[in-house]
Amino acid sequence: MDSFHYIWQYVKKYQVGYFFALLLVLATSVLVMVNPYISREIVDQIMVPQNYDFKLLLEFLSLMIVVVVIRSTIRYYCTYVFENTSQKVILELRKDMYSKLQELDFEFFDHNKTGDLMSKMTGDLDMVRHFIAWALCTSFENIIVFITGISVLFFIDWRFALLQLVLVPVLFYFANGLASNVRPTFYNIRAQFSKLNSVAQENISGNRVVKAFAKEDYEIKKFSTANENYYRANIESAKVWQKYLPPIITLGGMFSVTLILAGGIMVINGNITMGELVMANGLVWTLANPINLSGWLINDWQRFFAAVSKIRELMEAEPKIQTKDSAVAKKSFKGKVEFNKVYFKYEHQQTLKDITFKAHPGQTIAIIGPTGSGKSTLINLICRFYDVTAGYVKIDDIDVRDIDVRRLRENVSVAQQDIFLFSDTIEGNIAYGVPNATFEDVVRVAKIADAHEFILNTPEGYDTIVGERGMGLSGGQKQRVALARALLKNPSILILDDTTSSVDMETEHEIHNTLRSYYTDKTTFIIAHRISSVKNANLILVLDDGRITERGTHDELVNLGGQYYTVFENQFGDFNSMRGEI
C-alpha cells in the first residue's frame, strides 16, 4: 500500500471535496434500495390483492422517478469531482516529475532511455488519473452497494441472505488468486512497453541514419521483436484472466439462480411475500454487479500499483551532483582553472589518470587527442557534470564541489560536440541561455560565430524556425548557431568541444581570430582534432588513454618531436589518423 499512500499525498490537498463526493456515493448506494422497496409495495399493495388504485400507483411511480433523478444528479456531480481531482493531481505530479528530471545529472540520463522516461510521463500518469477518477470511487461504491444489498436481504429473511453469502468465500478464493497472479504480469507488460517505446523513439529520432545506411529492414526486425515481446507479455496476462475471470462471472450469475430457486420455495411456503421476492430480485444486481466488476477493478488496482512503482523510481532518484549547504554562491568568477592529480572512473573504466594543469584568465587551453582519450570527460569535470574520483578541480582557487552548482554553470558556457537545437527560431536558439538578450546582442554574437550571413539567407532570417534537433541546417551551420548561443552568455570560462569541426578551415581560422580579439579576458578551452584549431593556444594538452602525454605551446610541441609533431607532419591535422581512423 506504499504506492497508494504515495499518491494520496497529492490527493489529500483536495480531500475535502473528494471525501464529500464519496459521502454522496454512499448516499446514492443507499438510494439504490428505494426502488426495489417501492416495487415490493406495488406488488403487495396493488398487484397481488388486485387493488387497482391508479392514484397510489402513480404516487409510487412518481417517487421512483424522483429517486432516479436524484441519483443521476448526484452521480453527475460526483463524476465531475472525481475527474477534476484526478486532473489536478496529475497536473501537479507531472510538474513534479518534470522538475525532478531537471534536477537529475548526466549519470541518470546515461542509464535511462528517453522512451522509458516518456512512458512514465504519459502512460503511467494516465493510469494514476484513471485510478483516482474511476477505480477508487467505483471500488468504494461497489463495496457499499454489496453490503447494503446483503443487509436488506437479511431484513427480508436471514436464511435467504445466508444462502447468497455461501457463494462469497468461493468468490473470494478466485478474486484473491487473480490479484496475486496478475500483478507480476502487469509489471512485465510495463517493462516491455517501455522497451517498445524506446525502440520506436530511437528509430524516429535517428530516421536519417537508418535511411543513410539502408537499415530499414533491420529496424523493422528490431521493432518487431520488441512488439512481439509486448504482445507475449499481454498474452501471459490474458491467460491469468482466462483462468480466474470466468469462475468469477459464473458466481455472479449464480446469485440470480439461487434467488429464484430459494425465493420461489419460500413464497410457496409462505415465508416471504411475492413483493419481497420481487424486491430481492431487484437487489440481485447489488450482489452480482460488484462480483462481475471485481475482476476489472483488481485489474485497475494492479495496473495502478505497477504504474506508481515506475513513477516512484523517477521521483526517488537522487542526483549525485548536489550543492552543499555551505556552498560558495559567487555571482561571477575570474576564470582561473586548476586540475590537480585528477582521476575519473566511469563505472568500471578509468577514463582520466593523473591530470594536472593550470589555466589563467584570458588564456586559451587546447585539448587534443584521439577519440576516446578523455577530452570531453575532462571538460565535463569543469562544469561538474560529473565529480572527480580523486584529486580536485578548482575555479578561482575554490574546489568546484564547494561551489553552488547553478552559479558554477552560469559562469561556464559550453558549445558541446553533440549539438542540440530546439524547434524554435534561430534567434530563440541563440538566446536560449539569455532569454532577455536584445536582438542586437544576438546579431553581435552571430557575427563572431560567422553565422550572421547564412542566417540572413534563410527564408525568415533570424525568425526562421529550425526543425527538431536543428533539422534544415547543415552541420557547420548548427555548429555556428551553437557557438553563438555559448558566446551570448558572456561567461568567465568558455568551452568549445570540437565546435568548428564541420566548417572549412578558412572559416574556422576566421572564427578563432575573431574570438581572440573579442574575448581576451575569457578562459577558453578548445577541444579539437585539427592542429589548425589549436596552434595559437597558450597551452596545448595532448591526451592519450586518459593521460596527458605532452604539453606546451605549438612551437614547443613541434620541437619536442613527439606525438603532436607526428600529427603536424602528416598534414591531416587529425589525431584519429594516427590510429588508422577516418
Image (cartoon, rainbow, N blue to C red):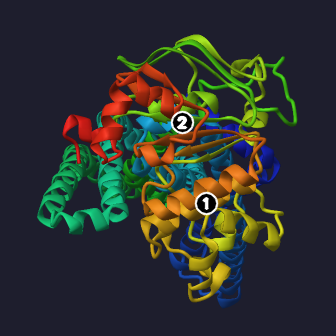
Examine the rendered structure and indicate whether residue 124 appears above or below residue 305: below
Q: Do the residues labelled 2 and 1 touch (CB within 8 Å)?
A: no
Q: Is residue 389 visible to us here?
A: yes
The image position of residue 163, as x and y in percent, is 38, 41
Residue ID for mark 1: 33
The one of 294 and 431 positioned closer to us in this rendering: 431
Q: What residue type is labelled 2?
A: Ala
Examine the rendered structure and indicate whether residue 63 appears above or below residue 9: below
The one of 483 and 203 positioned closer to us in this rendering: 483
Q: In which quarter of the image is residue 342?
A: top right
* SS for dot 1: loop
The one of 368 and 56 positioned closer to us in this rendering: 368
The image position of residue 29, as x and y in percent, is 63, 56
Q: Which residue is drawn at 81% across and 21% down?
A: 327
Considering only order in the chain, which callout, 1 or 2, is on the residue closer to the N terminus?
1
Q: Is residue 475 left or right of residue 76?
A: left
The N terminus is located in which quarter? top right
Q: Which of marks 2 and 1 is in front?
A: 2
Q: Is residue 244 left or right of residue 397?
A: left
Q: Residue at x 36, y 58 (%)?
A: 201
Q: Which residue is drawn at 59% across and 24% down?
A: 320
Label 1 crowding class (10 Å Cα cut-off): few <14, some 14-19, many 20+?
A: some
